[in-house]
Image (cartoon, grey):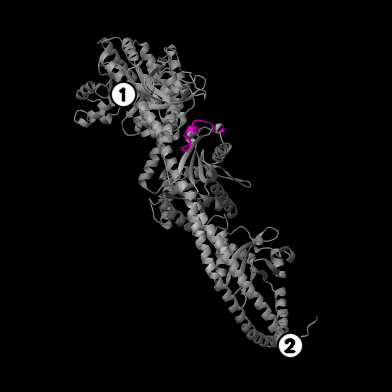
Amino acid sequence: MKLELTDRNLQRYHLTGTLVVVVVLALALAGSLLWIGLTEYRQITQRFEQAQQKRLHDRLQSEMDAAVGYLDFLQARTGMVLRKALQEKTAMAFQIATAIHQHEHGRHPEAEVKRLILEALRPQRFFDDRGYVFVRDLQGNGLLQPLNPELENTSLWDNHDDKGHFITRGLIAAARSSEAGGFSSYRWYPPDNRLEMSDKLAYVRLFAPYGWAMGTGDYLDLWHAARLKEGIERLRAWKFGDTGRFEVLGLDGQILLQPPSPGDEGKNYRQLASPEEQDIQRRMLALANEGGGLMEYAWRRQGSDIVDTRCALVQRFAPWNIVLVATLSSREIQATIDAEKASAWASLSSRLPYAGLVAVLAILGAILASALFSRWMIGLLQGYKRDLDAHALALEQKAGELHLAGHVFESSKEGILITDAERRILAVNPAFTAISGYRAEEVVGKQPDLLASGKHEPDFYRSMWQTIRETGSWSGEIWNQRRDGSVFPELLQITTVRSAGGEVLHYVGTFLDLTERKEAEDRIRQLAEFDPLTGLPNRSLLRDRMAQAMARAERENRRVAALVLDLDRFKTINDSLGHAIGDQLLQGVAARLRQLVRHSDTVSRMGGDEFVVALTGLEHPAQALPSARKILEALAAPFQLGEHELLITPSIGIALYPDNAGDPETLLKHAEAAMYHAKNQGRNTFQFFTPEFNHWVTERLRIENGLRHALARNEMRLHFQPQVSLATRRIVGCEALLRWQPAEGELVMPDRFIPVAEETGLIVPIGHWVLEQACRQLARWDAEGGAPIRMAVNVAVPQLRQPDFVDSVRQALQQAGLAPGRLEIEVTESVLLDKDERISRTLEGLLALGTKLSLDDFGTGYASLSYLRNFRFDVLKIDRSFVSELHRNEADIKLIRAIISIARDLSLQTVAEGVESEAQLEILQELGCNLGQGYHFSRPVPADQLGELMRGEREA
C-alpha cells in the first residue's frame, strides 16, 4: 500500500510510528534489565570462584616457593659442607706431616722422614671409610694411594677421567693456585660402582718442604643423596591448611614421599595397585617435564569410597632431579563459594519487581514524549525546507569563487601541493611538476616524504610537524629531491586548513626553488673566505678556524701550532720570470702543502708569498717538528713550470698555543717573528718562538744527527765497572756501560743520548754493537788467562721487540766462543709493564738460550712482586737510591733486608749498586747481599784498566 504524505497527515503518521518504536524499545529495556541481572549473577559467582581458586593457587605457590627455598639451601649447603670437610681432613693430614717433619728432620735421612710421613697418613680413613689421604709429587708420581697401592711410585701425570680431564695435572694446579691450596673437580669410580665414573671434589695443598701435593676428596653424589633424604623428611612433616601436604617423585617415576600412603614409597608409580593412582602420578611427571604448573585430580583414599577433588602445583627441582608436588583439597574453598552464590541470587530476586515497575513507567513516559517530539519535528522540517532554498543560492556563488581559485592554482609559479588530514597527496599544480619532475599521477595518493633528500635528521621533521600542530603553519628552508635524484634547496610554507569546528581538513604546501640564489651565495662566500689564486682559506677564514681550534684545545688540554712560511727569494723569481710564473709557483706550493696536512689542519695563504699551516690537537710541542721537516723536504724538490725548473726554499716560524699566545692574532704575530728569525739564521730552516725551546730543539737535533754517524765514525766507547763478591772481595763480573766520544767535542754521558736513540730507533744498531763488543772483550780477558767472570749488558725495550734479537745474541756468543751462561742480559722494571707479546717471547728465548736475566732498578716503583713469579730472573739489582743513605737511614736497611729476603726465597742473586764506602759494604755483607758494584771498588773504566785490576787480584 502506498502512503500519501501531506501537511495534514504527516503529524499523525509520525506520532504512530514513534509510539510503536518507543513501546518496542521499552519492552526490550525490561528484557535487557532481566538479562543483565542474570548475567551479573553469573559474573559475580564466576569472579568469586576465580578469586577463591587464585587464593588456593597462591597458597600452593607460596608453600612451593618456601619448600624450593629450603631445598635450595640444603643443595647449596652440600658443596659448602663438603668443601669444609675436605679442608678439615687435609688440614689434619698437614698437621701430621708437619709435626713429623719438624720432629724428625735433621735426625734421620730425608728419605726416612718422607717414609714416616707417608706411613702415618696411610691408615687415615673418614667419610664412611671412603675418604683417604693421597700424595703426589709435582712431576705427577703417586707417592701415597691407600686404596690402590699398586699405583704408588708410578707416574699418574696422564691419568684422565671419562671427560678427558687430566686428574693429576688438575690436582697439582690446584695445590699451586695459592698458599692455602685449592679445589679440583674430576670424575672417578665410586666404591660401589667400578663401571661408571661419578663427580668427585678434591682439596689439595702444597707441602712445601718436599714439594708434595697432599689432599683428599669425596663423591658429590653421595653428599647430595644425604641432603636429599634430609629434605624429604622435612617435607613429610610439612603441613599447610587443613588438607595441604607435599609429595615427591623421582624423574624415573619412583615415589619418594607420599604421606597418605607411606607403604608406596620406594615403589615405581607403575607398581601401584590402582590404575587411577598410576594415571595421577603419570600426569604429574608429564607436567613436570613440560616445565611444571597446576593440575586438578580426583583422589580416593585407600579403603574409602569418598572422592576428594584436589588441586596440585607441580614443579621440577633440577639440582636433585626430583618433582615436588604441593597439593590441597578443593573442599577448603567450596563452602565459601556456595554461600556467596546464595547471597547473589537473593539480591537478584529482590530487584525483579522494581525492574517491572520501571518498564511500565518508561512506556507511559515514552508515549507522552513521542507526542511532544512529533510536533517539534514538524516545525523543524518546515524550517529545513527554507534552509535548503537559501543553501542552493549560496552554492551558486561558491562555484564562481572556486573557478577563480582553480585558475590561480594552475597558473602560479610557486609549486603547490595539497594533502588530506593523513598527509596523502590530493593535488599538485604544474609548477610542482616543473620544479620536482614528478607528474600529478605519480604522486597523488602518496606521502610527501617521497621528496625527502636525506639531508635532514628525523628530529627536524618531528619538530616541523610539532610546530604545524601547535601554530597551524610552518615556513623555512629545506632540502628536497627531484625525480632524477638531484637535491635542491627550497623555501617552503605549510598551512593547515581546518573546518568550522577546528578539525584538520587539508595541508597546503607552497614552495620556491632556491637553487640559483644558493649558488650565488656560495660564489660570494668563496670570494670572501678563500684566496682566488690558490683556493686556500684567506686570513679571515684562518682566524675563524684557529679560534675554533684553540677553544677545542682548551677543552681537551691540547695545543695548536701556527707555522708561518715565507718563500726565500721569491721576489727575484717574480721580477725575473714574470708574475704568471710566480702565480704558478704559488699554486704549486699550495698544492704540496695541502698534501702534507691532516683533514683537521688548515693551510692558508696570507698574501704575497706568505703561507700559514695551523696544526691542531697536539699533545706536546715536539709534535710540530715532523710537519716542519716534511714541509722543508716537500718544497726542496724542484718545481717544473713549463720550460723553467725552479728551486725554492721556505723559512718557517713556529708558535704554540697556549705556550706563546692566547688568541689567533698574537699567535700569528709570534710565529711571524720566529719566521724572520729563521731567515736571519740562514733561511731554509725553522725556528720556534720560545728561545728555550729553540735551544732544546737545536741540542736534540745535534744529538740525533751525531748518533746517526757515531758507529760509522767509531765514536762509541765501552767502559766497564766491576761487580765484586762481598764474601771474597774479588771481581766476579762486570757491567758494560756505553759512552759517546764525538770527534769534535767532549764525552757525552748515556742519560743525554740514550733517550734520543730509543725514540729514533737508533738504539737497535747501537745495542747490537755493544753486545758484540762486550762479548769480544770478555773473550780477550779469557785469552789473557783471567778468571772466568760474567758480563752484564743493558738492553732497551726497542731491542727486545726485534724478532731476531735472540739470534743476534746467539751469534755474538758463538763468534766470541763464549758459553751463554757468561752473558747477563740486564733489563729494567719498566720492561715488565710493557704488554707487548714480542717482549715476552724474547725473554723466553733468552732463557731457552741459557743466558742469565738480571732485573735492574728493583724497588723503584714500576712493577709488582707478581712479575718475579711470572719471569724467571737470575739476578736482582738493588737500586743505588736505597744504598746511598744505607749507613744513615734505618728505613733503607729494612727495605734492603726485605729485598734480599725475597731474592733468597726465589733463589736469586742480589747485586747492590752505588756502593761508595766501607760502611755501606759491611752493612750489605751483614744483610746477606751477594755482590756489590760502585765507586768503592772502581769507577767505570776502559777495558785495559779493568784488565789490570783483575791481573792485580790474580797476583795478590
Classify the position of the N terminus by image quarter. bottom right
Q: Is residue 452 above or below residue 206?
A: below
User: In this figure, what is the number of numbered marks?
Assistant: 2
The residue furthest right is 1
Dot 2: within a 10 Å radius of its alpha carbon, few (fewer than 14), some, or many (20 or more) residues? few
Q: Which residue is mark 1?
A: 903
Q: Which residue is mark 2?
A: 9
Q: Residue 625 magenta-drawn?
A: no
Amino acid, disc 1: Ala
Which disc is residue 247 wearing? none
* x then y, percent, for residue 835: 43, 33
Relative placement, left or right, of 729 versus 308 is: left
* x then y, percent, for residue 847: 42, 21
Q: Residue at x 31, y 33 (%)?
A: 860
- Dot 1: what SS? helix
- Dot 2: what SS? loop
- Residue 419 visible? The answer is yes
**Closer to the eye: label 1 or 2:** 2
Tell me, yes or no, whether the two marked residues, 1 and 2, touch with CB atoms within 8 Å.
Answer: no
> 312 or 127, which is in the foreground?
312
- Residue 739 visible? The answer is no
Q: Is residue 644 above or below residue 165?
A: below
> 109 or 165, which is in the foreground?
165
Amino acid, disc 2: Asn
Magenta highlight range = 257-270
State the separation of the CA atoms marked 1 and 2: 126 Å
Q: Residue 258 magenta-drawn?
A: yes
Q: Is residue 36 above or below residue 595?
A: below
Quadrant in the rendering for residue 209: top left
Give the mark nearest the N terminus, 1 or 2. Answer: 2
Classify the position of the C terminus by image quarter. top left
